[in-house]
Image (tube, rainbow, N blue to C red):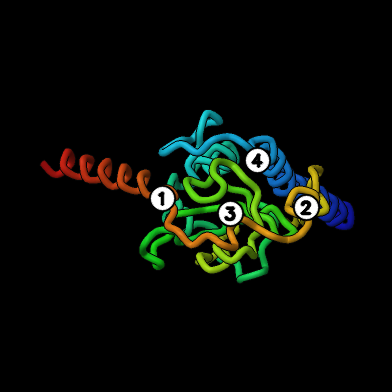
Amino acid sequence: MKNRIIHRFITTLFLFTIVSTWISAEPVSSILGTAFKLIGNPYRTGGTTPGGFDCSGFITYLYRPTLPGLPRISRDMAVTGESVGFGQWRPGDLLFYATGADSSQINHVAIWFGENAIIHSISDGPETGVVLTASDSRYWSRRYVGARRVLSTETTSSDIPIPSPEELLPEDGDSPWDNFDGVLRGDFEAWQQSDREAFETYKKENG
């Protein structure tokens, strides 16, 4: 009887591990597959739909079905999940950048796609809208702040049933971002709107 209970416990634990792994891995492939299909969609201030995204609106659209509690703007996303060291990124991790005039303020977020590629919605510069760019290009490597893992997964780029980033990035390794050094809006307008709404709520609650 005791051996039967132990066997049943081990079997249940094994099945739970398999199911948990599938549940955590499936959203990453789904998110990156959807993100890939959205390449070419335009940037729009405050946008959270395929008609136009700002950077964090793009993340919101992709991740909220799986993570309904994910914050709306990049600066708040940057304190969720688990911190990830430089170069230790896995597909689906969120990478954060300071693209504004203040190099200490996060105002842009991208998704690590794998194999030196990030996918994001860009407001200004040589490429705009949803694009796949090289993470080691001069602009993005200089503006990098940190990364967070918001989905628990062991998925690697080889597990994702979509084209390899190497097939999509320029073959000669040149990036239009190597010679750009301007300021990007990111989701700064969404910051302002969030702060205004928070202030109005405070006034209503405190008279």
Foreground residue among 194 and 42: 42
Asked which secondary structure carries label 2, the reply is helix
Relative to residue 120, is residue 47 depicted above or below? above
Give the alpha-carbon distance from disc 3 to disc 1, as whole Å.
24 Å
Give the alpha-carbon distance from disc 3 to disc 2, as whole Å.
19 Å
Q: Which mark is residue 49?
A: none
Mark 2 residue crowding within 10 angstroms, few (<14) / some (14–19) / many (20+): few
Name which of mark 3 and mark 1 comes first in the sequence. 3
Mark 3 or mark 1, whichever is nearer to me: 1
Q: Position of residue 50 (x, y in %)?
A: 56, 31
Give the alpha-carbon distance from disc 2 to disc 1, as whole Å.
43 Å
Q: What residue did someone put label 2 on? A: 17
Dot 3 amino acid type: Val
Which residue is most to the left?
207
Q: Is residue 103 left or right of residue 157?
A: left
Foreground residue among 22 and 89: 89
Mark 3 residue crowding within 10 angstroms, few (<14) / some (14–19) / many (20+): some
Dot 4 amino acid type: Ala
Name which of mark 3 and mark 4 comes first in the sequence. 4
Give the alpha-carbon distance from disc 2 to disc 4, as whole Å.
28 Å
Query: To which quarter of the image does residue 32 belong?
Result: top right
Q: Which mark is residue 185?
A: 1
Q: What residue did someone put label 3 on? A: 150
Asked which secondary structure carries label 3, the reply is loop
Name which of mark 3 and mark 2 comes first in the sequence. 2
Mark 1 residue crowding within 10 angstroms, few (<14) / some (14–19) / many (20+): some
Q: Position of residue 142 (x, y in %)?
A: 53, 68
Mark 3 or mark 4, whichever is nearer to me: 4
